[in-house]
Image: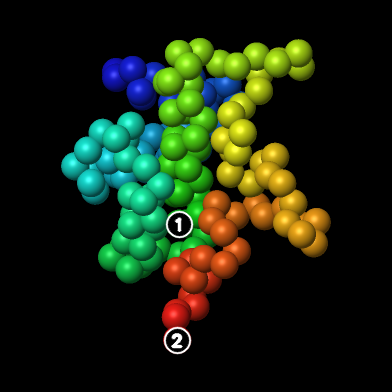
Amino acid sequence: MTHLRQIMLEELRRRNYAESTIHIYIHTVEHFSRHFHRSPDQLGPEQIRHYQAALFTRWKLSPNTVIQRLAFTLLLCTGVEARLERGRDTVSEEGFAPAAGAEPGRGRAPDRRGRVSLSSHPVDDPLCHGRTSR
C-alpha cells in the first residue's frame, strides 16, 4: 500500500466515513489518477476541472454522481495534501482540526446572502449547472 493511499484511508476513517463511502472514494481517486496517467499527488484543481468535464461528457454521469465522485478529489487536493506536507494532523484545543476548506460542503463561509453551499463546485460553474456561454 502506498503512503498516499494509507493517508487517504486514515483520513477517511478519522472522519468516520462508512466503509462503502471509503471504497467509492478510493476507487474514484484510482480512476482520476489513471485518467491522467499520473499519481494523485501530482494532480491539482485544473485536472479536477478537466476530470469533471469528462465525467459529464465522456461517461455521461448525472450531476449528483459527479458531485459525489468529486467530493473526495477535492478533499485530496486540500486536506490530504496538507497532511502530506505537514506529516501529521493539526490538533486544536477541541481535537482534530481539518485544513481550512478540507471537507466539501462543511465549514464553508456563507455567501453574501448568508447561504452555505453544500456543493463541491461554485454556484456559477456553468459546466455543472448546464449553462453555456453565449
Q: At 33% from the left edge and 32% from the top edge, which residue is drawn?
A: 41
Q: Earlier in the sequence, mark 2 or mark 1?
A: 1
Residue under label 2, please give it: 134
Would you say residue 19 is visible in this rendering?
A: no
Q: At 39% from the left edge and 56% from the top edge, which residue is drawn?
A: 49
Amino acid type at image mark 1: Val
Along the horizontal axis of the image, is 103 left or right of 77?
A: right
Residue 100 drawn at (x, y percent): 61, 33
Work out whether residue 126 or residue 26 is closer to the camera in this orientation and state it: 126
Q: Identify the residue at the far front of this view.
A: 112
Quarter occupied by the C terminus: bottom left
Amino acid type at image mark 2: Arg
Residue under label 1, please give it: 66
Would you say residue 111 is visible in this rendering?
A: yes
Q: Residues within 10 Å of mark 1 (few under 14, many from 20)?
A: some
Q: Quadrant of residue 55?
A: bottom left
Label 2 sits on a secondary structure element that is: loop
Q: Quadrant of residue 44?
A: top left
Quarter occupied by the N terminus: top left
Residue 35 drawn at (x, y percent): 24, 48
Q: Residues within 10 Å of mark 2 (few under 14, many from 20)?
A: few
Count up the numbered dots.
2
As drawn, the label of residue 56 is none
Q: Identify the residue at the far bottom of this view.
A: 134
Label 1 sits on a secondary structure element that is: helix
Residue 84 drawn at (x, y percent): 42, 21
Q: At 36% from the left edge and 62% from the top edge, which residue is drawn?
A: 53
Label 2 or label 1, whichever lies nearer to me, is: 2
Along the horizontal axis of the image, is 81 left or right of 17?
A: left
